[in-house]
Amino acid sequence: MSKHVLLIEDEPNIIEAVSFLLSRDGYKVSTHSNGHDALEVIEAKQPDLLILDVMLPGRSGFDILADLRGRETGEGIPVLMLTARGQTKDREMAQRIGATRFMTKPFSNAEIIETLNEMSLA
Amino acid sequence: MSRDTLTGSRIRERRLIQGMKQADLARRTEISASYLNLIEHNRRRIGGKLLLRIAAALDVEPSALSEGAEAALLASLREVAAGYPDHAIELDRTEDFAGRFPGWAGLIQGLAARQSSLEQTVVSISDRMTHDPQLAEALHDMLGAVTAIRSTSSILVETDAIETEWQDRFHRNINEDAKRLTESSQALVSYLNSEVSEPQEVTTPQDEIEAFFMRHAYAFNDLEQAADTQNAQDIITTLIAEAADILVSTSAQAQVSMHLSRYWRDVQLLSSKALLDEISKVGLDPAHIAQTSGVDLGCVMRRLASLSGNALTPLLQDAGYALSEEGLGLVVCDSSGTLTFRKPLSGFALPRFGAACPLWVLYQAISRPMIALREVAELKGREIAHFETLAISTPLTPPQFGAVPLFEAHMLILPLASVNQNETRTRPIGTSCRICPRENCQGRREPSILASGL
């Protein structure tokens, strides 16, 4: 059975490219593009894997992840965080609040597929 | 050493430049070589006919020997020296140096000015790189476009059997993102270029507000004269409209409107004339003025900050303050510590971005509401400067049962000419950690960019 990936990202063309890529690799993909109600969407969809952008309109990915990890239903979801800023402090922050993996934009297709495959096997 | 004793140094310098022996100059001016030696070492005063004879012998204007380096040059040299306390600089020979080597002294003055300008540019650029939302937004936009292009183009190149519909869609996306990337790059280059050429360009609402108040020297005579609230509101509207070139954002316009409305309310409680009358009676004592005027201390501090140095100086002769035209400085913050109003002073800069120095008495006031606090603060810049800082935290809202009041804190900044001998202690403080050179500070949040880089 294919794994369900929820991609929360505000760049429509990144959403389209990554969705296409993951679908071709056998994932079931759903998407969302703002931070306001991201938690509710995660709760409703209960994905196997979550790809979460840090800079989202309405609410930052860090805040969303911190809240998600505080909820019983969100504790175990593997989360790949995407950011346009590669600073160490962002990476440390992501790890501290419970991100499974962290990736800096721009990333390669092989990189994101490989990372998700590793996360889904873990 | 007073300036008029340096004529000898200048004579010696001129003679040496011309390669003339002391004995030759003595002979030409009809004095003994030993007497000329005493003159050249500033151990004999010189003037009158002998000065004219020496000037003629050296083929220079007498004024070139009698008029030494300008006071500004000497002040600059002392200021530069104060910035390097670890160097054994012969401060007692500053005038001698400037008199004998005016070119070198001018060069040091020029280099110091250039260093100061470069430091300001570095601080400004560093602030923007770290805190500027416009820059962060531009970079985020560019990296988003680059990511989309990279991912989409990889799909097109690496996917063998891709449907025509998807191909068309991805080509269109790449085209869109390439255009967006071009526009973002051009905007970023333009923005950074303008930053380099115009480092003081107004860019954020706080910058806009500060530029507006600086244009008006933090005082609004029209509002002082307003007949009633409606008239005051009309004046405020006009002031904001006339500043359309700097008050660009609606946020800045709204904040300026709030500040000016409060200014008008303050004027109703304590006019400039009444305030100056009080100062002439009791001196610069905000607590006393608040008591006798029946207004709160925060209001008195705001009113004092609106007075110019020219108005205050005649009333505060020999009071120990180093008042310039700027008058007094003022900082206001809310309960979160965010600065909501800033009137900086020379030597007491206020951070444009990020948090201020946690050692300010302003922040002590937040944790000790309704207690008037005073500290003499020591700021380390090119030279050490002292300021009397007075702070109070007062409720912003009237008390209500069951409601927690909001507080705001004021800190009035008074430049001191010197520290009073009776002062029990002074507190070393800074502006903000990023540009503070103090080492081993318990309040430090981050390393200073001035500590090693400059």
Image (cartoon, rainbow, N blue to C red):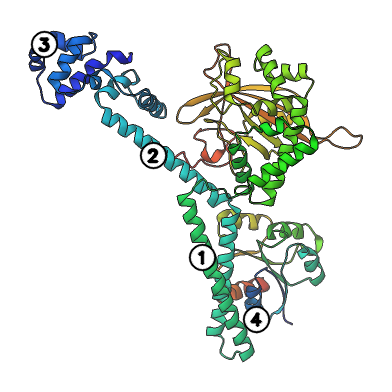
Left or right relative to B346: residue B83: left
Identify the residue under disc 2.
B114
Question: What residue is shown at x 27% (from left), y 16% (from top)?
Answer: B6
Identify the residue under disc 1.
B185
Q: Chain of mark 3?
A: B
Residue type highlighted by circle 4: Phe
Expressed as whole percent of the image width and height from the top left, the position of residue A86 reads 55, 60
Residue B33, which numbered label? 3
Expressed as whole percent of the image width and height from the top left, the position of residue B131 reads 58, 50
Q: CA distance from mark 3 to mark 4?
A: 98 Å
Identify the residue under disc 4.
A20
Asked whether residue A104 is in view, the answer is no
- B101 vs B278: above or below: below
Residue B152 sits in quarter? bottom right
For marks 1 and 2 on the same chain, the one whose residue lies earlier in the sequence: 2
Q: Are marks 4 and 1 on the same chain?
A: no
Q: Are marks 1 and 2 on the same chain?
A: yes
Residue type highlighted by circle 3: Ala
Expressed as whole percent of the image width and height from the top left, the position of residue B186 reads 50, 64
Residue type highlighted by circle 1: Ser
Please tell me how crowded label 2 is: few (under 14), some (14-19), or many (20+) other residues with Cα within 10 Å: few
Q: CA distance from mark 3 to mark 1?
A: 73 Å
Please tell me how crowded label 3 is: few (under 14), some (14-19), or many (20+) other residues with Cα within 10 Å: some
Residue type highlighted by circle 2: Arg
